[in-house]
């Protein structure tokens, strides 16, 4: 939970973070990236330096839509602009299947590697493209690789200035983010009245604050993740399309990039299903809307909106 409603640093431009009690439930989000979109390999994420690479999303996205349909999951898909330009039909299929499409930026470049102006231009380009492709307003944003890092980042304010309803870029864990980042939904308020809802991803392991997604999540016993889900006010799980299949990535990785991609992948699709089995999931847009209302004001059509993830009464996953 958020420890305080005060500003987290001496930076006068940092927003005040206020607990958003109305933002509750279980959510699944997907970062829609190819296997090669790893910031650990700069020549892969920069199209100007990237040579021809095998691509999988044209096959993986329909598989994922079918899987989520079978599980009854309504998810939020954070789509890269460069992916939407190449596969607009697949992006429209996400909307047709009842999922939310949100913005992951245009290119998979770390936010802090660019000026606030260049960052804002990249995000605007991606959002405008996604809205043209889907015919719907795009209200959510997530930076590649959690690269907004903390509340002090001026690029976080840029997300609010661009008119997004919510951000989901601040990981409450050392490394990808900061331990001081909020672990539960908050409403961010700047001194001039600008506002934004922050919806952080789930962490587990108590004081260790380990991400429930990526290699930390894939290597965790499903029962441990399940306990983290049911104990959270809002449990936001994060996956990538390539993670949920056992096929090896079709290209070349070494070092940290290979470890981050491969650790715990075998069987993760089946284990992930055990973690989310019977969970009444909500889109992040719906949760962000609830954040601006008292918890009791959430619509009755969203079952998890009436309480936190802890009110989801479902059998616990086996420990194996």
Image: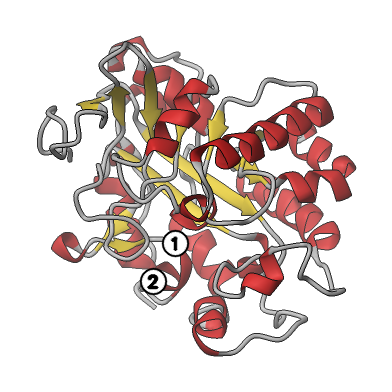
In this picture, is 91 found above or below 16? below
Q: Counting other residues with Cα less than 10 Å from the Cα at mark 2, is it few (<14), some (14-19), or many (20 or more)?
A: some
The local secondary structure at tag 2 comes to helix
Percent x, y of residue 5:
13, 27
Residue 75 seen by the camera: no
Name above or below for residue 223 compared with residue 180.
Answer: below
Query: Seen in the image, is 145 located left or right of residue 44?
Result: left
Mark on residue 216? 2
Q: In which quarter of the image is the C terminus?
A: bottom left
Q: Which of 312 and 166 is in front in this view?
A: 166
Q: Can residue 11 be seen in this view?
A: yes
Report the Cα–Cα distance between label 2 and label 1.
Answer: 6 Å
Residues 166 and 264: in front is: 166
Query: Toward the viewer: 263 or 172?
Result: 172
Relative image position of residue 197 (x, y in whole percent): 38, 26
| Quadrant of res 137 | top right
Q: Mark 1 points at which residue?
A: 213
| Residue drawn at 54 percent across, 60 percent down | 273
Quadrant of the rendered image containing residue 179 = bottom left
x, y percentage for residue 58? 85, 58
Judged from the image, the secondary structure of the residue bearing numbered disc 1 is loop
At 45% from the left and 15% from the top, the residue drawn is 300
């Amino acid at each position: 939970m958020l420890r305080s409603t005060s500003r987290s640093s001496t930076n006068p431009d940092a927003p005040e973070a206020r607990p958003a009690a109305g933002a509750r439930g279980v959510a699944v989000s997907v970062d829609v990236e190819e296997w090669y979109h790893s910031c650990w390999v700069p020549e892969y994420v920069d199209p100007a330096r990237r040579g021809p690479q095998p691509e999988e999303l044209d096959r993986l996205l329909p598989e994922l839509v079918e899987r989520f349909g079978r599980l009854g999951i309504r998810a939020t898909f954070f789509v890269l602009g460069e992916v939407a330009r190449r596969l607009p039909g697949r992006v429209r299929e996400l909307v047709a299947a009842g999922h939310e499409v949100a913005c992951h930026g245009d290119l998979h470049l770390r936010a802090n590697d660019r000026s606030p102006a260049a960052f804002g231009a990249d995000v605007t380009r991606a959002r405008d493209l996604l809205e043209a492709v889907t015919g719907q307003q795009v209200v959510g944003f997530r930076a590649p690789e959690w690269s907004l890092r903390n509340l002090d980042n001026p690029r976080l304010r840029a997300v609010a200035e661009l008119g997004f309803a919510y951000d989901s870029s601040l990981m409450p864990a050392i490394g990808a983010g900061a331990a001081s980042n909020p672990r539960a939904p908050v409403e961010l308020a700047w001194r001039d009245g600008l506002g934004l809802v922050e919806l952080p991803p789930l962490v587990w392991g108590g004081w260790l604050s380990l991400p429930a997604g990526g290699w930390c999540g894939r290597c965790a016993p499903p029962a441990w993740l399940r306990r983290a889900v049911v104990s959270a006010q809002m449990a936001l799980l994060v996956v990538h399309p390539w993670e949920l299949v056992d096929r090896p990535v079709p290209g070349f990785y070494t070092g940290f990039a290979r470890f981050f991609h491969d650790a715990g992948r075998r069987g993760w699709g089946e284990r992930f299903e055990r973690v989310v089995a019977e969970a009444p999931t909500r889109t992040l847009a719906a949760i962000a809307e609830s954040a601006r209302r008292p918890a009791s004001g959430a619509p009755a059509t969203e079952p998890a909106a009436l309480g936190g993830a802890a009110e989801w009464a479902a059998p616990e996953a086996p420990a194996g």
